[in-house]
Amino acid sequence: MSLIYILAGFALLVIGGEFLVRASVALSFRLNISRMVIGLTVVSFATSAPELLVSLQAALNGFSDISLGNIIGSNIANIGLVLGITAIISPLIVDRDFYTFNWHVMMAFSLALYYFLWNSGDLSRIEGLILVLAIALYLVVLIRRARYKSDIVVEEVDESLKKTSAFRMAIWLLIGGGALWGGSELLVSGAVDLATALGVSERVISVTMIAVGTSVPELAASVIAALKSEKALSLGNLIGSNIFNIASVLGITALISPISVNSQEILTNDIFWMLGFAFVLIPFTFLPRKYEMSRYKGAILFAAYAIFTGLTFLG
């Protein structure tokens, strides 16, 4: 039954996330928010909703390792799995904004998360507030930069949603919210039961299975874009969700319910893998061929992710 719960939870999270994104974008158009701002903020927040609901549900139910493991594992999967597979299918041109701005922000948030957890053994409400304020400042800077720089790639926005009626928006919000809540309930419950049945910790299931499940929307979108050979596919947008996962998802979750580190492997193993995957993108950007995420680099990232997953289960 635990596998059925997990699969049903994944399905509901994908459905709920899609409806929430569409409703959020349609509402933003109604409020006369510019396409650029919608692409940089609204879409990013809405696509992080599955991770938020899962982490929040786990924290409220007392499974802090699932809250942390979901985000840390998702950030690892976004680079090792999503970026790795995408680059294998179609090499990526690295946009300048990635290595001059976005990478530094991602590393800053990643190191801040490590410091907060290492310093006190939990993520407190104050630290959650710091993360939320930091992501707000980041968005302000991001929007200002986008207004003055024409080469920044903005998340794709469906212009047809401008004509969405208020009734349809309300239905989409209800379906999205309900599916996300139900999916997070089933996923957390199934993950705990599966961990018990396999004799492993909730942390192992969360940094692998749950993390991959909540990264499926990013993987699907990136693979489709790569198969279509869309040159607008941006490395900055691919890793942008890592910033939102730490700052908005864990920040908001900690504001509502402080997150404790129950499994020391999160601090002694998992978070170092997350930092390592994030850090290696810079040498990959410049060596040996500059400004390209080639197929063999993608293969290295994917192989490293497979090693991480294997060691996590064996450990």
Image (cartoon, rainbow, N blue to C red):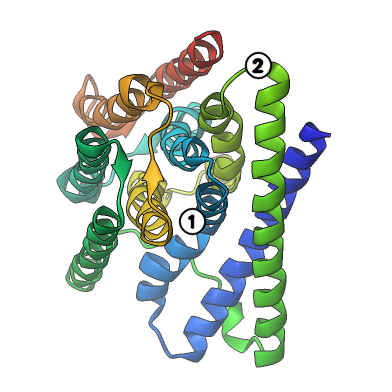
Q: Picture coordinates of residue 273 (x, y %)?
A: 35, 23
Disc 2 residue type (three-letter): Gly
Front one among 32 and 274: 274
Residue depicted at 49% across the width and 33% down the height: 90
* Residue 1 appears left or right of 233: right
Q: Quadrant of residue 133?
A: bottom left
Front one among 218 and 188: 188
Front one among 139 and 201: 201
Residue depicted at 37% across the width and 54% down the height: 254
Which structural element holds mark 2? loop
Q: Quadrant of residue 79?
A: top left
Which structural element holds mark 1? loop
Q: How many numbered callouts?
A: 2
- Residue 259, placed above or below residue 48: above
- Residue 266, placed above or below residue 257: above
For mark 1, what is the residue?
Answer: 48
Q: Residue furthest top?
A: 314
Residue depicted at 30% across the width and 24% down the height: 272
Q: Quadrant of residue 137?
A: bottom left
- Residue 133, placed above or below residue 113: below
Q: Which of pointers 2 and 1 lies earlier in the amino acid sequence?
A: 1
Disc 1 residue type (three-letter): Ser
Q: Quadrant of the N terminus?
A: top right
* Residue 67 appears left or right of 267: right
Q: Picture coordinates of residue 247 (x, y %)?
A: 32, 54
Q: Picture coordinates of residue 68 (x, y %)?
A: 43, 39
Residue depicted at 21% across the width and 47% down the height: 96
* Residue 253 appears left or right of 131: right
Disc 1 crowd rating (10 Å Cα; few below 14, some 14-19, many 20+) is: many
Q: Picture coordinates of residue 193 (x, y %)?
A: 71, 31
For mark 2, what is the residue?
Answer: 199
Report whether residue 223 is seen: no
